[in-house]
Amino acid sequence: MTDRREREGERERERERTFKLKKERIATQCVCCGSEILKSSPAVLMPFVAHRTFGWKPAVIDESWGLGTIKDGNAYSICKSLFCNYCGFLFLDIRFSDEELSNLYRDYRGVEYNDLREYYEPGYTKRNENLNAGISYIDDIENFLRPHLSFPITILDWGGDTGKNTPFKRNNECLDIYDISNKDVIKGAKIVSKAVAQSKKYKLIVCSNVLEHAPYPSDLLSDITKTMEKESVLYIEVPLENVVMSNKGDLHLHKKHWHEHINFYSENSLRLLVQNVGLEVVDLKRLQATAGGQSSFLFQVACRLKTN
């Protein structure tokens, strides 16, 4: 036990020595690789996100404002699209606080959330019904992970919502879910706090469609490593966004608005992010899948703790 604690402590100290990020309201570093050489372009924060997160509503400027040097028109929340040339990471410059994330994701896709989003984005309610039906590619996830697992397994789904999309949810010894939305979970699953999750070790940790929302994904992954041991597998799934797939270089020039996804990953940025928190990729794949009635691409990544 002492030897294991010493090894874990050394891994943590090594991560701190090699990867330090400033925690900023407006990012001046790449939050995947730490590079400070970034390109930027003006963009807007979508009004639903600005309203729910900060209480910022759009304004209509007209002559009654008396602003002689500002043109009349709609005023939205300004932001920047940042692009890291080194690792190919595209991201929003605003980095949300824990309180702001709570504002945005409280009762995620519940009545209050849906009503406000429908107000700004007519037609969202119908799309949300499709999303609530669950994903159709769980078999693909399980087939990707099965070669890296030894059954029976214990599972932690970090950001797992209700657990309806958790792989192997009917083939495990334990299914714990840690999620800030505080929703009721499926039968057989149990909600746990971060402290409880980090007091245990799991064979499979799932982090699916979470890192694209995280202000500092390295912090989130570092928290997850505390639930892992040598044999554990971490499954990461993030969207392979169309703007990343369809363009080469200067991606910031093609991204003019930001919604809930504040991080757009390239394969290189994902690999560097994982490496910088003391993990190693054991498998990585691109998958075309359907969710919410829409087809899109995503990255599947299986990771383990570095062994040296």
Image (cartoon, rainbow, N blue to C red):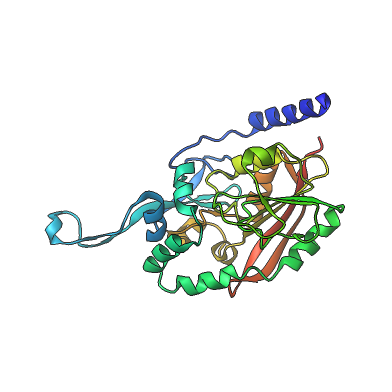
The x and y percentages for residue 4 are 81, 29
> Relative to residue 162, is residue 63 drawn left or right?
left
Which residue is found at the position 56% from the left and 51% from the top?
182
Residue pictured at 54% horizontal, 52% vertical: 181
Q: Is residue 284 left or right of residue 90?
A: right
Residue 46 visible, this orientation? no
Q: Picture quarter containing residue 75? A: bottom left
On-image quarter of the C terminus: top right
Where 51 sits versus 5, above or below? below
Residue, far front: 187
Q: Please determine whether, in this image, residue 279 is positioned above or below residue 60.
A: above
Q: Quadrant of residue 17?
A: top right
* Residue 207 in sight from this viewpoint: yes
Question: What quarter of the picture does the N terminus occupy?
Answer: top right
Q: What residue do we see at 55% from left, 64% from top?
A: 247
At horizontal 39% and vertical 51% (from top left) the residue drawn is 79
Query: Number of marks in the image?
Result: 0
Q: Which of 97/200 is in front?
A: 200
Which of 247 and 49 lies nearest the eye of the viewer? 49
- Image location (x, y in percent) of residue 233: 77, 48
Q: Position of residue 147 (x, y in %)?
A: 85, 57
**In the image: residue 37, left or right of residue 51:** right
Find residue 31 and report its horizontal and vertical position in percent: 56, 43
